[in-house]
Amino acid sequence: LNPAGHAGQEGTLLMERTRARGASSGFKVAVLGAAGGIGQPLSLLLKTSPLVSTLHLFDVVNTPGVTADLSHINSSAVVRGFVGNDQLPAALDGVDLVVIPAGVPRKPGMTRDDLFNINAGIVQKLCEGIAKHCPRAVVNIISNPVNSTVPIAAEVFKRAGTWDPRKVLGVTALDVVRANTFVAEVIGVNPEIVDVPVVGGHAGVTILPLLSQVTPSFSFSKEETEKLTVRIQDAGTEVVQAKAGTGSATLSMAYAAAKFAEQCLRGLSGETGIVECAYVSSDVTELPFFATKVRLGRSGVEEIHPLGPLNEFERSALSKAIGELKGSIDKGLNFVRK
Ligand code: NAD
Ligand code: LMR
């Protein structure tokens, strides 16, 4: 044998073994709604994540094609497709993290709450499946209206006896991504070094960027604060209008959701110091659910950060956010209790 050829074979074997080890050390993740506008690019990003060993793609349509397509990517995660409600149990079996972008998106002129009638039932059914088939999984909820779908999930899990407030997270990561981008434009720095805490919820005035706590620290004028706050609150609508009836944010959402899911997995793996904003069961305000920074760890949400010092503008915005959030939370809870 040519020594160089021999060394090559050994190298290949070593790579295969390393790849196999990598595959078995990652997490099993399911995407519910995987064939949709968010589901497809999100699944693509998760397929390439070294933290994912097995990726289950579930939808009521079209997962065979998406699965075949993604499975040809030479990253270590193994992709399996599941289509139709009969296959939901298998899709959820043994899963560590479930990400839910299932449901209809907005068209121009609609609020997120206008999606409630369709999406509430979808999230309820999927969470009933989670309670039965992977009750200990961490759940990331993207489906709108997030302000109500998270309370729906909590109520389903309470009824099933599987409720663990550390495991259910409404995904508000896109609000942070947007806030970081828009703030970076104003202060003239690379958006990757900006961190704006966004608290409250995920719709209109419930989205509350705490611009007084931005990193790197910056003192915005009253006019800048008002303009930036409104732009961040209306950013979803900006995309809905630009897409002119063909849907809402999908690519930026997939980016934000994949990063957020990876942070949850880093926490599950025991990595320390993982802090992200998320809409969770919380006692930071009088409401049962609220978005703030949270520390992620082996059991999911391990610590909820306080709001920190707010300026007068933020205190007044907070009381508006709480007023609207209360109605959305009650609507979600009552939907399951009815
Ligand atoms: P989409 O219509 O492109 O895709 C939704 C997918 O869900 C479809 O493939 C559909 O077949 C699937 N689906 C429907 N019922 C299902 C069920 N019972 N089980 C499994 N899958 C099911 O919509 P999209 O653009 O991907 O948006 C999805 C949801 O995400 C919407 O509710 C949207 O408002 C929301 N969203 C949230 C955020 C956020 O920041 N949290 C951002 C963007 C969009
Ligand atoms: C967003 O913020 O982009 C999503 O909530 C989708 C929407 O309807 O705006």
Image (tube, rainbow, N blue to C red):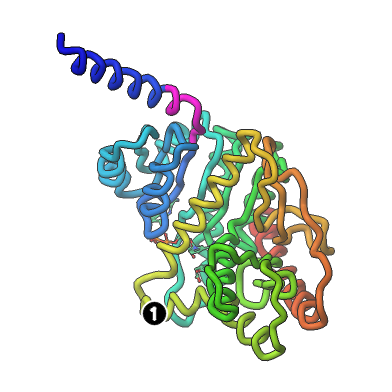
Question: Residue at horizontal 71%, vertical 71%?
Answer: 217
Circle 1: element type:
helix
In depth, the one of 109 and 116 nearer the eye is 109
Q: Which residue is mark 1?
A: 242
Left or right of 197, for residue 100:
left
Placement of the N terminus among the 4 image quadrants = top left
Report whether residue 338 is seen.
no
In depth, the one of 111 and 76 nearer the eye is 76
Residue that sits furthest to the front in the current view: 3
Q: Position of residue 164 (x, y in %)?
A: 71, 41
Q: Is residue 278 above or below residue 248?
A: above
Disc 1 marks which amino acid?
Ala
Q: Position of residue 94 (x, y in %)?
A: 52, 29
In depth, the one of 293 and 238 nearer the eye is 293
> Quarter of the picture for ligand 1?
bottom left
Q: Position of residue 83 (x, y in %)?
A: 35, 42
Q: Position of residue 181 (x, y in %)?
A: 53, 71
**Residue 17 sits in quarter:** top left
Q: Is mark 1 within 8 Å of ligand 2?
A: no
Report whether residue 33 is seen.
yes
**Magenta portion: prevailing SS class:** helix
Q: Is residue 25 magenta?
A: yes
Question: Residue at horizontal 45%, vertical 64%?
Answer: 252
Q: Is residue 240 magenta?
A: no
Left or right of 11, for residue 296:
right
Placement of the C terminus among the 4 image quadrants = bottom right
Question: Residue at horizontal 51%, vertical 73%?
Answer: 236
In depth, the one of 259 and 104 nearer the eye is 259
Question: Residue at horizontal 42%, vertical 63%?
Answer: 250
Magenta region: which residues? 21-28
Q: Is residue 133 above or below residue 12?
A: below
Q: How many marks?
A: 1
